[in-house]
Image: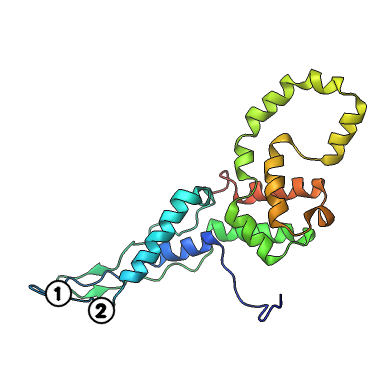
Amino acid sequence: MRIVDPQAATLTNIEVLAFLTENPPRRPPNPPPNSRNWVPSPDLRDHNTVVKEIHNYVQRLSPHLLKYPRYVHEGLPQQAETTDQGAQIPPPPPPTEPTPLDHALRELITRLQPYGLTKGEVLTIVNLGVGLDGAAASGDQEAQAEDGADVAMADGDAAGEEAGEEGLADEDYGALALLDTVIEEREERLSNEDVAQILKIIRETLGSGRK
């Protein structure tokens, strides 16, 4: 594969959602009385369908995106206002200062740079929310680990050394399997300790605790 334009911008799903949320389409004018086969101008019906499908996709298939740090500015109007004469007043442009999501993505990219991930790999990690579900369930799994401590001791020192080399908590193995499909040649490029640090960075920047 050859990169034609290395400077071409690529947006994550959450950035697309943020843009569409902060830049709603203008409300089409009302049809004139007794009109048939009337087409509004501008005709935004296809655009509105695309926006609706994107929101449905996030709600049904990627609900974790809604738990990311706030991705829109507060207090923005959702639609253009209409005067009594039918003329539209466009909403004011969104503020230019970064949102909490902008800060989180910038921090995530900066902290992941030492691990040599490609732009596409980081983008896919953000889209999938790798590791975030495991973080939410860590409390229950830690309790289970304490209950099974005696069994682990019986396995001998060799098993303990092997677990130490792996460097992953029990709840991270699902995320590891997902990262193996996202990061090309993951086992050759990243150790399990690196994966544990990557998951920690993801949770600290995109986790639900960040607003």
Would residue 72 be seen by someone viewing this image from the given angle?
yes
Which of these two is toward me, 134 or 1?
A: 1
Residue at image point 70% right, 40% down: 172
Which of these two is toward me, 203 or 189?
A: 189
Which secondary structure, mark 2? loop
Quadrant including the N terminus:
bottom right
Disc 1 marks which amino acid? Gln
Residue at image point 67% right, 81% down: 4
User: What residue did someone put label 2 on?
Assistant: 41
- Image location (x, y in percent) of residue 178: 67, 49
Judged left or right of residue 83, residue 59 is right
Contact between marks 2 and 1 (CB within 8 A): the answer is no
Disc 2 marks which amino acid? Ser
Circle 1: is it few (<14), some (14-19), or many (20+) Cα within 10 Å? few
Circle 2: is it few (<14), some (14-19), or many (20+) Cα within 10 Å? few
Relative to 98, is 200 above or below?
above
- Image location (x, y in percent) of residue 28: 25, 71
Relative to 210, is 25 above or below?
below
Relative to 153, is 65 above or below?
below
Judged left or right of residue 91, residue 135 is right
Quadrant hosting residue 112:
bottom right
N-terminal of the pair, mark 2 or mark 1, is 2
Q: Which of marks 2 and 1 is in front?
A: 2
Would residue 91 be seen by someone viewing this image from the given angle?
no
User: What residue did someone put label 1 on?
Assistant: 85
Relative to 6, is 108 above or below?
above
Total label count?
A: 2
